[in-house]
Image (tube, rainbow, N blue to C red):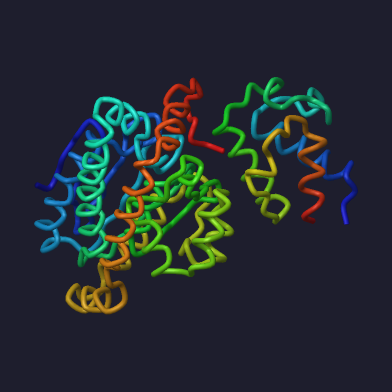
Amino acid sequence: MKKFKGKRLSWELADEVLELELHSPPCNEIGSATLEELEEFAAALESAAQHSSALIIHSSLKAGFSAGADLRELYARGQQLAASHRVAGVRDFLERVHRVFNAIDASPLTTIAAVHGVCFGGGFELALTCDLIVADKMARFCFPELRLGLIPGFGGIPRLKRDLSNSLVRDLLLTGRSINSTKGQAAGLVSQLAAQGETLRLARSTAAQVKKFDRATAGAAKRFLKPIPREELRQEIEIFCDLFTRPAVMEKLRRFAESTDPLPYLP
Amino acid sequence: MRTLEETTDEILSLAAVHFRVPREELRPDDDFFKKLGMDSLQALELLTRIENHFGVELPDYEMQGVTDFRTLASRIQARL
């Protein structure tokens, strides 16, 4: 399918470049509805690979790229289930997310995340599936999960550790602080800095450059450079599910869900 | 090396531009959440503008409990 317009996201393939646009307010939270559309996208990505060179993932919302997992939905679903079934539900959700994120990570296309504003938690983890991150100077990256008594569950730790360093993961994870894109570029996370509002244009310019190269060669280089850290991704799911069984997590999720702040995940 | 007063003044100017309010309406002891009607997203935006302007990093947790420009400036000043 060359074009799709969903409630949470849309995509279009034109001139060898596939663009995935996130547009689920307030800030592209990833819950079950978004995941269903992402699963459709992952299927389309596989079939589009023969006709395209690059993928750009971006958000059309002012607030930013994505604030991460839909924690209100996570809490509500947890409430509906008995404690004994809660972890099974979370595990199923995480495994579905991992299948989609692994498909993007392993795609033979050269993949670019065009990031502005908030890029937190699961949103950061989505950006980390991409080969390149182009970010504007107002973008911020954060792993806030420890505030909820959890670790990132969408593959963020193994991917950031694979791409950068264990020390940066520790800094972000253990302090919960957010970093701006200038710091991100200095750390090697951000490949190009854009002026505010210019990320998509820069990402398209990069995609136009990428198209000049032979796809088989670029795909071979990518397979060599960017192995999927499957064992660590599996461990991450296990640790997340183990932590999720603790009553303190549901209490923290309750406080979050009952917050009236429109963006309560922010520090 | 900037003085605390100079740092405060620069932050007030950055906030005035970002929130499109006249600079003369902002005072060092103003509660910026009340004065500017700032939400948490806007607080992050202001933090990013300040970090970019001064070329420093200010971890979010150093902003916790800070509500006035002068205290914010002192947090920045400690990293210049």
Q: Is residue A16 above or below residue A216?
A: above
Q: Is residue B17 above or below residue A161?
A: above
Which image quarter is the N terminus of chain B in?
bottom right
Q: Could you tell me which residue is drawn at 36 percent across and 62 percent down? A: A206
Whole-percent x and y of residue B63?
68, 40
Q: How many marks?
A: 0
Q: Could you tell me which residue is drawn at 46 percent across and 29 percent down? A: A256
Side of B73 where A267 appears, left or right: left
Q: Residue furthest front?
A: A84
Which image quarter is the C terminus of chain B in?
bottom right
Whole-percent x and y of residue A216?
17, 76
Whole-percent x and y of residue A172?
53, 55
Side of A5 where B3 appears, left or right: right
Closest to the observer, A93 or A210: A93
Side of B74 where A148 appears, left or right: left
Q: Could you tell me which residue is drawn at 57 percent across and 31 percent down? A: B40
Whole-percent x and y of residue A139?
51, 47
Q: Is residue A259 above or below residue A14?
A: above
Closest to the observer, A237 or B63: A237
Q: Could you tell me which residue is drawn at 34 percent across and 51 percent down? A: A126
Q: Quadrant of residue B46?
A: top right
Closest to the observer, A54 or A143: A143
Side of A202 where B10 appears, left or right: right
